[in-house]
Amino acid sequence: MQGQDFIISAIDNSPLNRGMSGAAILDDPENHVIVSGEDISLFVGDGSTSYEVHFIYKSKGREAIKASRAALGEMFKDGLADLIFGLTPLHLRHARMHARLIGGRSGGIRQTDNGPCELFVMSREMWKGSN
């Protein structure tokens, strides 16, 4: 597993970073970070069992799908999450396809401060039904 400096740098330098601080993310006990090689799955908690997910991946294709499914599985199987969601910018067709391939269900288009995004959701029940 990569160390804290790697994770902080990846978050801070992500091209889609919306003002998140890698150090602050790691310092918050509500958040969970799962690292697989150079792939980072970041689950930002809100104090409940709902998490917003961000994927910062070097891998592509099947390898990325496998890493995402494994990270989601850890969150659901360990009882940490009941609902995981993400907002994916409309212009990132590959990321939207990735969300669908890992089992995310579209919740429609939402206007955000960063432009239009598609909301994807996955509940624990949805996860159990697809695995």
Image: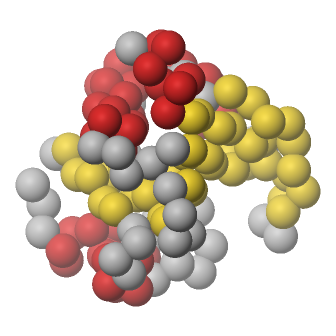
Left or right: 56, with 104 as reference point? left
Relative to 65, does residue 20 appear above or below in the rendering?
Answer: below
Can you say which quadrant of the picture contains the N terminus? bottom left
Residue 10 visible somewhere in the drawing: yes
Instruction: Say which residue appears at 75% left-offset and 30% top-offset.
Output: 106
Residue 76, percent from left and from top: 38, 38
Residue 55 visible somewhere in the drawing: no
Residue 24, percent from left and from top: 40, 86
- Quadrant of the image occupied by residue 71: top left
Residue 112, percent from left and from top: 84, 63
Left or right: 75, with 1 as reference point? right
Compare residues 130 and 60 and report the one nearer the observer. 130
Left or right: 50, with 38 as reference point? right
Relative to 106, does residue 58 appear above or below in the rendering?
Answer: below
**Residue furthest to the top:** 130
Relative to 117, does residue 96 appear above or below in the rendering?
Answer: above
Instruction: Say which residue appears at 68% left-offset and 38% top-offset.
Output: 120
Instruction: Say which residue appears at 37% left-offset and 51% top-offset.
Output: 80
